[in-house]
Image (cartoon, rainbow, N blue to C red):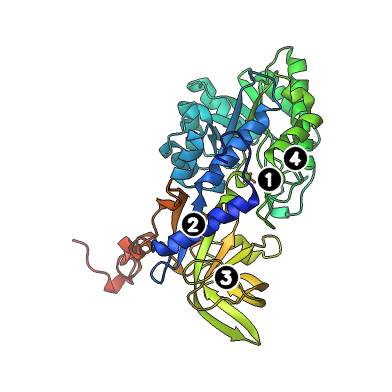
Amino acid sequence: MDGTDGTEGTGAERAARRDAAVRAAVERGLLGPGAPLAGLLDVVGIRESAAALRAAFDAVVAPGTPVLHAFAVKAAPLVPVVRLLHALGLGAEVASPGELALARAAGVPPEHTVLDSPAKTPQELREALELGIAVNADNPQELERIDGLMRTTGSRSPLGVRVNPQVGGGSIEALSTATATSKFGVALRDEGAREWVVRAFLDRPWLTRLHTHTGSQGIPPALMAEGVAAAYALAEEINERAGRRQVDTVDIGGGLPVNFTSDETSPTYAAYARELRAAVPGLFDGRYGLVTEFGRSLLAKHGTLVARVEYAKSAGGRPVAVTHAGVQVATRTVYAPGAWPLRIAAYDAEGRPKDGPDVVQDVAGPACFAGDLLATGRALPLLRQGDYAAALDTGAYYFAHHYGYNSLARPGVYGFAPDGEGGVAFAVVRDPQPVQEIVAEAGGAHADALTSALAPRETRPARG
Ligand SMILES: *Cc1c(COP(=O)(O)O)cnc(C)c1O
């Protein structure tokens, strides 16, 4: 299965690639006593998911419909990942100056880039409009800023407005963007809001897009489809009142949920695309271009975070494996374990899958607080000193989302793929962070800032 036909490989194939990669990473020394933590990315899996996404929408749109799949860079902000997805025909959705810089460094052209974020500064807006990047205005004040830029400099950027269809939330409140009081977009069901949006378009012939993103993990696809249907109905209303096809593109956001309980992909892009077409047929009949913004579902299942067991101990009768993966690389899981449980796989010191009877144990991280646990009370083959614990499905929003607690270093990230001779080839995606860089980021160049420049007057060195 090479993924070019849009079919994703089976979960068993994925697991076999992962096992081979962990073993090879240990053999190659990418993991070991001196490198106790690494992120591994399955390039075959990423290719399959990108191809599956494109095939899913190709199968439901009218021939010739322009479709841009803009990868939500937030989900895996790594330049080589964005470049790989670009090479596979995807664009980039960015939501900060940093993400825009990453997309540009990856070579994503402006016409394949979309800027969304709730707090764009005038300077960010100006840069985006100068580059010709698509921008979705979040709110009336932002639209006013864009008005000013359009008056003075003009732009060929496709411009839109983000609307919140207020269709409700999913199982994770923090990731539900279409609740009644969500901070995102123009709340469409609020009094007068719908009419305001319609007028905003009628007054601005250059507004051509509507954007909606109902949420991320935890939103059922049917609720996402409801949000898309609301944006479509609004586009139809605007076009009707404008007497022309002013809205020519609907950006339907991302947010397809990921299955964190097994190696299977579920739901699939194909099923979601079919569900969307059934719910909103008019959006697929060729009158509208489409933009999508998937993030987690493209990457999550292709990442594995592998941590060496530094010590194996026991407390209160429960075995505890103290590993190098904790809050710094699995922040959401550690702080909200109920919402973000991760599967853990056990490997021995040579990187081979461990067998043996399941033992209920805790898998802990290296940070200095008691709650720094990757998993509690988990039944696994007993982890021993020198073994490896792997946190699965961590290709999005985990090891690429470092959190600086305890000044723990960012781990190396390596892509892997078959080497053509039955083995595994690796490529560095991100080098492990050296401690000098941690010092530099911690104000190392300003070591005297508080002792010297701001010393009490009498002891301050005289200025010459
Ligand atoms: C986070 C986000 C996405 C991507 O969501 P995923 O759950 O990673 O697919 C897409 N669009 C917007 C506007 C977002 O904020």
Of labels 2 and 4, earlier in sequence is 2
Of labels 1 and 4, earlier in sequence is 1
Quadrant field for ligand 1: top right
Can you give x and y, in whole percent of width and height, for residue 112 in the image?
52, 29
Query: Could you tell me the amino acid type at mark 4?
Result: Met
Residue 133 visible within the image: no
* Element assignment for label 2: helix
Of labels 1 and 3, earlier in sequence is 1
Residue where numbered disc 1 is placed: 183
Measured Cα–Cα span from mark 2 to mark 4: 35 Å
Foreground of the two, 4 or 196: 4
* Element assignment for label 1: loop
Q: Residues within 10 Å of mark 3 (few under 14, many from 20)?
A: some
Residue where numbered disc 2 is placed: 21
What label sits on residue 224 in the rendered view? 4
What label sits on residue 300 in the rendered view? none
* Element assignment for label 3: loop
